[in-house]
Amino acid sequence: MAHPQDKYADFEGLREQAVALRRAGLSRRQIRDRLHVDNNDILNRLLEGEPPPEWTRRPNAKDDLRERARELRRQGWTYDQIQVELGCSKSSISLWVRDLPKPEPRRTPEEQRALMHEGLAQLRAHQHREQEAVRQAASAAVGALSDRELFLTGVALYWAEGAKSKPHRRTEVLQFINSDANVIKVFLRWLELLDVTRDRLTLRVSIHETANTEAAERYWADVAGVPVSAFSRATLKKHNPRTNRRNTGDDYHGCLMIYVKQSANLYRRMEGAWYGIVLGANSAT
């Protein structure tokens, strides 16, 4: 039986074959399998001086990143900063620099918190500017309303917020209550469009008993453009100490209730127009 080393007896002939295969573009593994060379030392000698083909070369892009990451780490950069700078994953960065000492913090905890709060404030200010720009653009796109547009707007507003007649309790009268000053202004403008004069309105503030009723009446009088004397006696809501009320403070003005006298026919117009809106929306293409 031949000794295992006998196949390497013709070393030069074997080297010629190995070199030829290498220059043909084969990898070390392919040459090893082709020539049945199981000894790495001998394979190294057979291929000595022969560069590997390009396709077997390991890309050095990450080698460059690794050296840059280590350089930045030595300068005291954090993983997050290195990740932003190099655009590679934290797991790779950790693997590359884990043998380097952790840099000392550049700032105290108080300074870090201050920077964080400053960054959040800048972010919120930027978000607010973007949100306000959207609002301003949307507001400008509406422009002046025609009488028809205002009428339909008022109908939809009333149906959403106003008192409505029920089959079990027919009350065909316009009664509206809201805490939003702009909603009240639009509703009053809608009533003007319907030729409802101010003498047909009963105005009343509805507010918690613990709030400043007089200040609320002055506020709503300014919104409605009427004297405080035009208000009926305020409706006071009982305060339940077990509830966690948030509508308190100087910005709390309660709600303004508006009752329109002799408004049964107007109520029917509003109700009919609302169902017209519903039918129109369903048939829109």
Image (cartoon, rainbow, N blue to C red):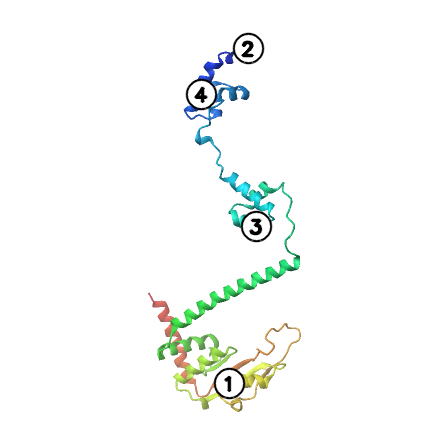
Q: Nearer the viewer, mark 2 or mark 3?
A: 3
Name the residue that disc number 2 marks: 3
Q: Measure how far apart labels 2 and 4 are at the Cα level.
A: 25 Å
Q: Nearer the viewer, mark 2 or mark 1?
A: 2
* Image position, residue 166 (x, y; %): 47, 77
- How packed mark 3 is, by other alpha carbons closer than 10 Å (few <14, some 14-19, many 20 or more), is few
First-in-chain label (2 vs 4):
2
Name the residue that disc number 1 marks: 222
Name the residue that disc number 4 marks: 19
The image quadrant where one finds the N terminus is: top right
What is the secondary structure assignment of the residue under circle 3?
A: helix
- How packed mark 1 is, by other alpha carbons closer than 10 Å (few <14, some 14-19, many 20 or more), is few
Amino acid at the residue labelled 3: Asp
* Image position, residue 110 (x, y; %): 66, 60
Q: Is residue 197 left or right of residue 42?
A: left
- 64 versus 15 height, above or below: below
The part of the image, by quadrant, that contains residue 189 is bottom left
Q: Measure how far apart labels 4 and 3 are at the Cα level.
A: 48 Å
First-in-chain label (3 vs 1):
3
Q: Are marks 4 and 3 in contact (CB under 8 Å)?
A: no
